[in-house]
Amino acid sequence: MAKSGARRQSPLAPGGIAHNIESEPELEGDSMADPTNSTDAQRNRSDGDNWPGIPLVGLGIVIVGAVFLARNFGWDFPLPDRWWAIFILIPAAAALVSAARYFRVDGRFSSRAIGSATAGVLMLATALILFLDLDWGQVWPIMVIIVGLGILWRGTARR
């Protein structure tokens, strides 16, 4: 005998195929998951109110703008020849801050924290290589090492 449950049309299903809602497995972190589950509640809570990361990034951008404005009006602030490499630090800092936030929310180095940390370290290494005018022909293996370490770290975090 067929189970009489709620049926719905999948917007991506061809030809009007309907399926049982009850037969769908519940995914970890799913928005329809039990709201009383503490891990889901921890992951979904907002930490933006008690962490000063966003104002610090904004303050840094204001300072950079003020330095450029002052230079336009004749004040001489010495900048290195490759000052533009500093702009790579903005997304690197954002990735590293995200990794720290994921660590704090998850309570451990989860896959998403490790992925953000790896991306941040890659961008940080790129910025330093460009800023210090190092020879890419000699230091490119650093990027391969960072990616490999990130993959190894992520693999050990799943255990």
Image (cartoon, rainbow, N blue to C red):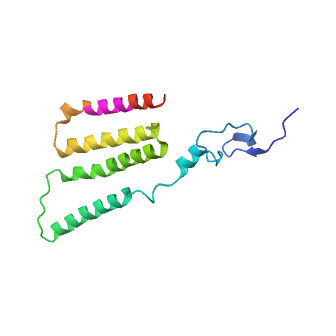
Q: Is residue 55 above or below residue 119?
A: below
Residue 127 falls in image quadrant: top left
Residue 99 falls in image quadrant: top left
Please give the range of residues in magenta.
142-151
Residue 109 included in the magenta stretch of the image: no
Q: Quadrant of the N terminus?
A: top right
Residue that protrudes farthest toward the bottom in the picture: 73
Q: Is residue 31 above or below residue 75?
A: above
Q: Is residue 94 left or right of residue 81?
A: right
Residue 149: % across, % down:
34, 30
Q: Nearer the viewer, residue 22 or 12?
A: 22
Q: Is residue 15 left or right of residue 147?
A: right
Residue depicted at x 24% and y 51%: 86
Counting labels gives 0
Residue depicted at x 12% and y 68%: 75
Residue depicted at x 33% and y 61%: 58
Q: Is residue 114 left or right of residue 12?
A: left
Residue 104: % across, % down:
44, 46
Q: Is residue 105 above or below residue 49?
A: above
Q: Nearer the viewer, residue 100 or 115?
A: 100
Residue that protrudes farthest toward the right in the picture: 1
Residue 66: % across, % down:
23, 67
Q: Is residue 90 left or right of residue 49?
A: left
Residue depicted at x 75% and y 45%: 8
Residue 150 included in the magenta stretch of the image: yes
Residue 116: % across, % down:
40, 42
Give the main secondary structure of the magenta stretch: helix
